[in-house]
Amino acid sequence: MQFFSFWRSLASFRVRIALNLKGVPAEVVFVDIDADTHRADAYRKINPQMALPALVTDDGTVLFQSLAIIDYLDEIYPTPPLLPADPLGRARVRGLALIVACEGHPLLTPRVRRYLDRELDLRDSQQNAWRRHWTVETLAALEGHLAGHKATGQFCHGDTPGLADICLVGHVTAAINQQISLSPWPTVKRIHETAMALPAFARAHPSAQPDTPEAMRAK
Amino acid sequence: MQFFSFWRSLASFRVRIALNLKGVPAEVVFVDIDADTHRADAYRKINPQMALPALVTDDGTVLFQSLAIIDYLDEIYPTPPLLPADPLGRARVRGLALIVACEGHPLLTPRVRRYLDRELDLRDSQQNAWRRHWTVETLAALEGHLAGHKATGQFCHGDTPGLADICLVGHVTAAINQQISLSPWPTVKRIHETAMALPAFARAHPSAQPDTPEAMRAK
């Protein structure tokens, strides 16, 4: 199994956590988005969408989109499960994950930042305000669904980590990178700390990858 | 079961198609985004994220995020299935659906248009260029994955409609609303036409809902 990853990509971060939690080994291929390697022919042949991550199975099938990859891993390697056993629980966990994946993250991706910069010629202050706005809106949406909900436990859903936590920590990482204080969202803050204390999450962090530039590495 | 819907919402459109394909009756509650009804207390109590759609089960559980709702419906009402039976097929269909849901649609939503308009004060021509850019990028990503792929059939995956087709038709509807010609993406165009010829898709279209304004109704 080959896993195409970039240290800073928050969608790659999600799949790294899932692989770690499952204890599944994968050959990691580093794709440098900063050097436009994702737009070069070699990667384009693998994923015509030129987006990271991608997972190539041993029979050569290319899987794309981080949540689809994680769903696949959860089916093929069911232990530990990343989704609850009951349909209503699964719907809640998927819904929380999609708040991040379909609403927060898409507005913070490199291709959007490139558009704001090159096509709209926004000032740095406007670009920062854009990122902060959508980051905060998603933190608030997560807190609204998590705080006081009877299914929320040590993690987003009960006391074991799963798909929603995987997405939550990526989004909180984006917030921390922007120096956004998490105090208005105490449930999100608590779950992030609980999850990142686990080796499977910590080892997957953008600051700790083989392709992380020296200046960005955790000290 | 209560389904909170808005005629123009493409995420609501997705759930309407799924309900129609499954033949599942739901009491539809219309939430007028244009009148900010989604931000009023009544709906906020149901979905603190103030986003549409939402599905409330008979025991009062609130489901949110269209793809999570559709996954739930597919588990509870398995016929006809909206996902393939094999894990690799499911990953492909989920990946195609997520290209629309996580990358195309998020950049075209009312809250993003509001930000471009009010916070960035973009001219109409810039707003139109923004919408066209992300709409086209997603059409190209879909075509890249669908054209010539051995699993592509009459529909995105084989010869029966499923989750990927549900997302595809919503995105193509956004393209048609912008008068974007589909000729550069013939596979997407063909699948859209095939799907929209089915009553379950046609009856779910934004132009044919009880809350569709008279001027926007299909003639």
Image (cartoon, coloured by chain):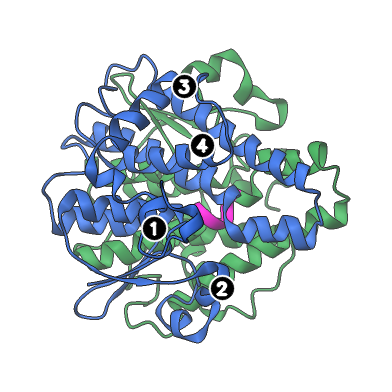
Chain colours: A blue, B green
Residues flagged by tags 3 and 1 on a common chain: yes
Magenta segment includes A55: no
Q: Position of residue B205 (x, y in %)?
A: 56, 50
Mark 4 closeness class: few <14, some 14–19, many ≥20 residues within 10 Å:
few
Chain letter of disc 1 in the image: A
Magenta segment includes B102: yes
Q: Position of residue A34 (x, y in %)?
A: 56, 67
* Residue type marked 1: Ser
- Mark seen at residue A144: 3
Q: First in sequence: mark 2 or mark 1?
A: 1
Chain letter of disc 3 in the image: A
Q: Which structural element holds mark 1?
A: helix
* Residue type marked 3: Gly
Q: Quickly name the residue at label 1.
A: A12
Q: First in sequence: mark 4 or mark 1?
A: 1
Q: Quickly name the residue at label 2.
A: A35
The span from disc 3 to disc 4 (Cα, nearest Å) is 19 Å
Based on the displayed image, in which of its 4 quarters is residue B214 positioned?
Answer: top right
Q: In the image, what residue occupies the spot 40% across and 79% down?
A: A46
Chain letter of disc 2 in the image: A
Q: Which structural element holds mark 4?
A: helix
The span from disc 2 to disc 3 (Cα, nearest Å) is 38 Å
Mark 1 closeness class: few <14, some 14–19, many ≥20 residues within 10 Å:
many
Q: Is residue A6 left or right of residue A138?
A: left
